[in-house]
Amino acid sequence: MNTASNSSVNSAQSDSFIRDHLPPPEQWPQLNYEFPQSAQYSVLDQQLNLVTALMDKAAMNGLSDRPLLRSPRITLTYADVNDRINCIAQVLTEDYGLVPGNRVLLRGGNSVGMALAWLAVVKAGLIAVATMPLLRARELGDIIEKAQPTVALCDIKLLDELVLAQGQHPVLQTILPFNVMVHPQGLATLSSQKDGQFIACPTLATDIAMMAFTSGTTGKPKAAVHTHRDVLSACEAWPRYVLQATPDDIIVGSPPLAFTFGLGGLLIFPMWAGASVYFPDVAYTPEVMVNFMNEVGATICYTAPTFYRQMAPFAQAAGLPKLRISVSAGEALPDATRQLWKQATGLEMLDGIGATEMFHIFISSAGKDIKPGAIGKVVPGYTAKVVDDAGNEVPRGTVGKLAVIGPTGCKYFDDARQLNYVKNGWNYPGDAFIQDADGYFCYQSRDDDMIITAGYNVGAPEVEDALLKHSAVMEAAVIGQKDDERGMVVRAFVVLKPNNSADDAMVKTLQDHVKAAIAPYKYPRIVSFVDKLPRTETGKLQRFKLRQL
C-alpha cells in the first residue's frame, strides 16, 4: 500500500491557522494511493499545486487553445483562464497582501466569475472557502467566525447578506465584487490593471487547498479540509475509471460550485479531462436545463435525482441527442427515477455516492456494470466494506455500516465529530448498506434514517421508491415516527401531482400500492400530504426538518 505523510511540519503556507486546528495525526484517516494504473502525474510528489498541475496537463496535451469555461456571453480557453486567474492572484497577493494559508471566502452561484475566483485563490496558495448562494447573514457569519477570512470575493448580486455578516464579523475586512465589468473596487477592474505575470505558490502536496462546509442535512454543518494532493488524487479515481470524460465533452449541471459534488463535476474533473463547462446566466429550471443542453450540445449532465425526475417530461418532448452521460449523486437515486429518465432519454443513469468529507464519489458504476437496485461497486483506488458496530465486516447480504479507505479522507477543522467519522483509519460516511454476492453496494439509508418497527428494519429510500412508482406521486419522503406499541412506525410525506386529491381515499391507495410493491410491514402507517419537501441548496432531502414536524 502506497501511503504519504498525513501532515507536514514544513509548508509553503506561512499562515498555519487551519493546519493548527486539524485533528491530531492519530485521528486522521489512512490514505491509500494504489491505483490499478499509474497516475498521469505522481500524486506522491512532495511539491504540488492543484491548479498548476491541471493547467500543465492541459498544455502538455495540446489543449491550451481549447475552450474551458463557457457562458452565453463569453468563452474562455485554458490559456485565457490561466491569464485571468494569474491577474486575480496578483490582486489578492499584491494589493491586499494575502499570504499562503490565508483564507478567502467565495460567494457566488455557478458562473465563469466564480470558477475563476476559486482557481485563482488556490493557485496563490490561499485556502478557498466557498459558500452556498442562498446562505443568509447569520449562516455566513458562522462560516466567517470559523474560517477567519479577511477577504471575500462575492458575486455583485449576492452582496447584501455578506455585507450584513461583515458588520457582525469585522475580521472580514474586504469584499471584492465580481461578475461586473465596471466597478471601482470590482475584481474585474483591479485585475485589468495587472500584467498576469504570476508564479504559482510552490505548495506542498499536503498544503491545504480548500475548506468545504457540509450541506446541512443534519442541521449542523461541518468544515472538511482537503489538500492539493486530496483533490488531484480524486481526479485519478472516479473521473478516470468511471466517468471517462474526453476533451470533446461539454458539461452542464446544477450542483453549486460551493458543494464538492459541483466543484468536482463542474470544474476540477472537466479540467483534468481537458473538457469544457457551460454556465448559464439564469437559474436552472428543469425545462431551462433541457433547453440549454440542446442549445450548447451538452454531452454530460450532473444533477440530483429530484431534478432528473422533473426534467424527464421535457427531455422526452425535446430529445437530448448529444447527451451521453447523466450523473446522479447527492442523494439516493430511486429506481423509479432511473427508469423514468431511461424511458425519456434512452440513457442509463450513472449513479454514485460520495461525501464532502471524501471530496467526491467513491462507489459507482457505469455502462454494462450497472445493476438495478445497486449504486455500484467501489471505485478503483478505494476500498469499501460493510461492517457492524465493532468494525467487523458482516456477511454479504447483511445490513451494516459503510466503511471506506482511499486516496481521500475526512479531516474536519476543529470539530470533535472527527472521532465519529474516522475509526481505526477507516472513514464512516454514515450510511447503511448491503453488499451483495457480486460485490455491488446497495444503499439502504443514512444510519440515523433506518426505521426499526416492531423488530423489522425498514430503509426509508426503499419505501420512497415504492411511493414514487405510483402515478399520482410527484415526490415522497419517509421517516420513522416514535410509537408506543411498535417503537417506530413508518411515516410518509407526499407531494401529489396536480389534479389528485389529498384525502383518505388517496392515503389508502398509496398504502395498498406500497404493500403490493414491497414487504407489507414496510408500508407507511401515516401518510401526510405536503406542498413541498425541505431540501438543501444541493437538492438533498432534510429529514431532520420533517422529524421536527
Image: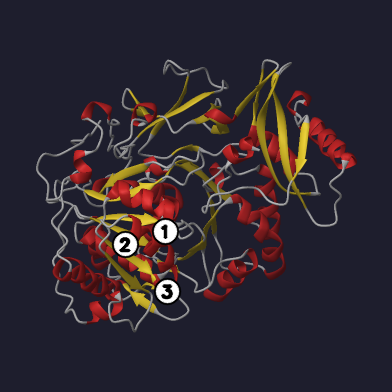
Q: Nearer the viewer, mark 2 or mark 3?
A: 2
Real-space CA distance between mark 2 and mark 3, rounded to the nearest whole angstrom? 16 Å
Residue 231 visible, this angle: no
User: Dividing the image into 4 quarters, which one contains the C terminus?
Assistant: top right
Query: CB under 8 Å between callouts 2 and 1?
Result: yes
Q: Nearer the viewer, residue 310 or 340?
A: 310
Q: Mark 2 or 3 closer to N-term?
A: 3
Q: Which mark is residue 118?
A: 2
Q: Along the horizontal axis of the image, is 403 left or right of 340? A: left
The residue carrying pointer 1 sits among few (fewer than 14), some (14 to 19) or many (20 or more) residues within 10 Å by Cα, namely: many
Residue shown at the point (74%, 44%) measured from the top left? 494
**What residue do we see at 73% from left, 47% from top?**
530
The residue at the point 65 percent across, 67 percent down is: 287
Tag of residue 70: 3
Q: Nearer the viewer, mark 3 or mark 1?
A: 1
**Residue 90, picture quadrant:** bottom left
For badge 2, the amino acid type reads Trp
Q: Which residue is mark 1?
A: 257
